[in-house]
Amino acid sequence: MLRQYELVDRVLDYDPDADEALLNRAYVFSMHAHGSQKRANGDPYFSHPIEVAGILTDLHLDDETIATAILHDTVEDTVATSEEIERVFGPSVARLVDGVTKLSKIEAQTESERAAENLRKFLLAMSDDIRVLLVKLADRLHNMRTLHFIAKPEKRRRIARETMEIYAPLAERIGMYEFMKEMQTLAFEQLEPEAYESITRRLAQLKEGGGDRIAKIASGLKLILSRAGLEAEVSGREKHPFSIWRKMSERRVSFEQLSDIMAFRLIVPDVDDCYRALGLIHRRWHAVPGRFKDYISNPKRNGYRSLHTTVIHADNTRVEIQIRTAEMHAQAEMGFAAHWAYKQKAAAEPEPHVGWIRDLVEILDTAGSPEELLEHTRMAMYQDRIFAFTPKGELIQLPKGATPIDFAYAVHTDLGDQAVGAKINGRVVPLRTTIENGDQVQILRSQAQEPQPGWLSFAITGKALAAIRRHLRQKERDETIGLGRKLYDDIVQRLPAQIGADALGHALKRLKLADETALMTAIARRSLSDAAVMEALMPGAAGADVQHAPQSSAISIKGLTPGVAYNLATCCHPVPGDRIVGLRRPDAGIEVHRIDCPVLGELAERAEGETDWVDIAWGEKTEGAVARLAVEVRNEPGALGVLATIIGAHRANIINLRLDNRDTGLHTNVIDVEVHDVQQLMRLLAALRAAEVVNAVERV
């Protein structure tokens, strides 16, 4: 722990005009206030705020911020009051301490409690003075450094998860990458201890086996630059364990397959030298396509500037290189803290790239209510995740690219299962719509709804995907059994005579199946042929003359779900009302074709006994199907608009459209339209043929 004079000397070293008396008063006040309080490791509690202050001296922060760090736990954890802090240390320090205390109180609440008013307090505390956030980040960093002293594993994991999900991204958002990396590493060690141990062990082995490999590459880089008359400070390192683990997860590769685990930093005198150095490196080694980023001409939103490139070094090793000036490097290391290095800067207007702080303040000033704040706030501090809000103001965290389906399942599984649509910021949108940061999302639900197979194409969260797949597996099982029972009844009807009550039980024994459910599943999946089932039910029936057997009726697919128990063939696009036939293949669902599908004959010849047909009918069906139309239209302005108007007027829905053929006077468009039944489709075809711009239209 830093002694009083050591801490004061640190501040005076970089800020000779610092208020030494303020720092001394804060040190003594905090020590007396915390008294005999102990931390989990047995150290005096007072050591924690002093270490937090020490972390902030490394960022060269002003004396008020250091005093705040020393005092940041006094109001919350001791008998000291905000009024006492203001009386002894002045209104500015008191305001900062109060801001850190508010953040701590919000942190202690559960996620479900963080509704509108709590979010308002959080944003106010942070946007009122960014130094509040800097103290809180240093506080969290020191707590993570001592996290291993906490006895309860579940508490360690909770703190680590909160750090990974909230504080590390916040540090990244304001450009404090060193804070972010250390937080991620310490949290990763708690959340994935086996992966952490494995990666650190392999890094150690790599270092032992490669000797001074990093030093050799660094000296080689420096030599190339110096020969061209360009002086540079070159340093190299291995990427931190969490970064490596994330790359392994994203790319789905092993540690051995991950080639770019080394990163090098080049610090050059000015911006022109950055681009000179880049050219020299690319002339010496092949650049990896798609891995060059120019954050100098296009800085990140947190103000980060640098050139990034990855090259193929010796032995096909990928090496990541960052090129920047000393000023850019200071910004990259200290982030927003660089703007508070001295009291003079603390009072200055923030630089343009941190305008998001001003945006938050403006939103807070203009929002008429907490709910309006939630509706319009864009929490742009997070880059890899977004925040959206329920109508009641609850904050829901999602990955980028999430849709209302992901949102619904994040709120509750039942809500996801029953989702039929969504409102985003009051506007009705499809479930596949991408949610943006700060959106207010309301899920529209129906008791009659259930998860649909198509949701899997746009859901991206693990919780949503797992719930959808679990439901579809159960639905497929139930529908397969139901279909199998219908097929079984058809088989029984084709037998030459009626069977007794015990026939099914005997058949299960002959077929070595556990129960009736297994039999129905095997029939539906055609892992048993109809002949085998007939033989098991009535030995000798499979080879008997059954031409006089009662004629069975067509099997209805009413109540079954397309894509689950059966599939609509894409070669002929059958719709309800078409005469259809079912194509059965081993271990597959029924494939439904129109009776006049031109490929049926080819399929039958190719199958050579591995496929059989089943007479099926639509039954009553409320869901639509997709028909494909080839529409030949005149090449004139507004022709596509006419087609769209006619299709919409007939309550059909365009699913896809492509230009298939383009002549001088005529264009052929292939249009997929969703219709309820064949009667609706016929009316649509007639209307299209009557249009002046249409030369011909036919069903494909």
Image (spheres, rainbow, N blue to C red):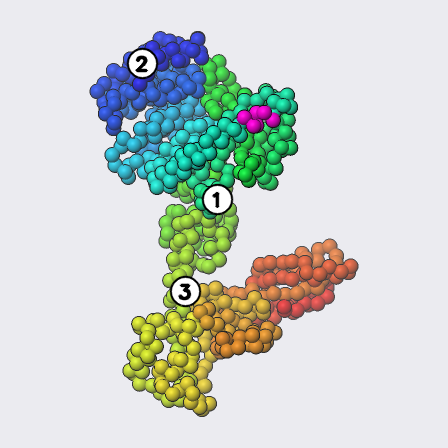
Mark nearer the N terminus (2 vs 3): 2
Q: Residue furthest right?
A: 664
Left or right of 610: which side holds 536?
left
Residue 140 x, y percent position in the rendering: 36, 28
**At numbered mark 3, what does the secondary structure look like: helix, strand or loop?**
helix
Label 1, on which residue? 257
Residue drawn at x 58%, y 69% as measured from the top left = 572
Q: How far apart are the alpha carbons under marks 2 and 3?
A: 69 Å
Quadrant of the snapshot with the N terminus:
top left
126 above or below 558?
above
Mark 3–mark 1 contact, CB under 8 Å?
A: no
Q: Which amino acid is tagged 1?
A: Gln
594 above or below 184?
below
Q: Is residue 443 magenta?
A: no
Residue drawn at x 57%, y 22% as measured from the top left = 232
Q: Residue furthest left?
A: 36
Label 3, on which residue? 476
Q: Which amino acid is tagged 2?
A: Arg
Choose top left, top right, bottom left or bottom right for residue 66. top left
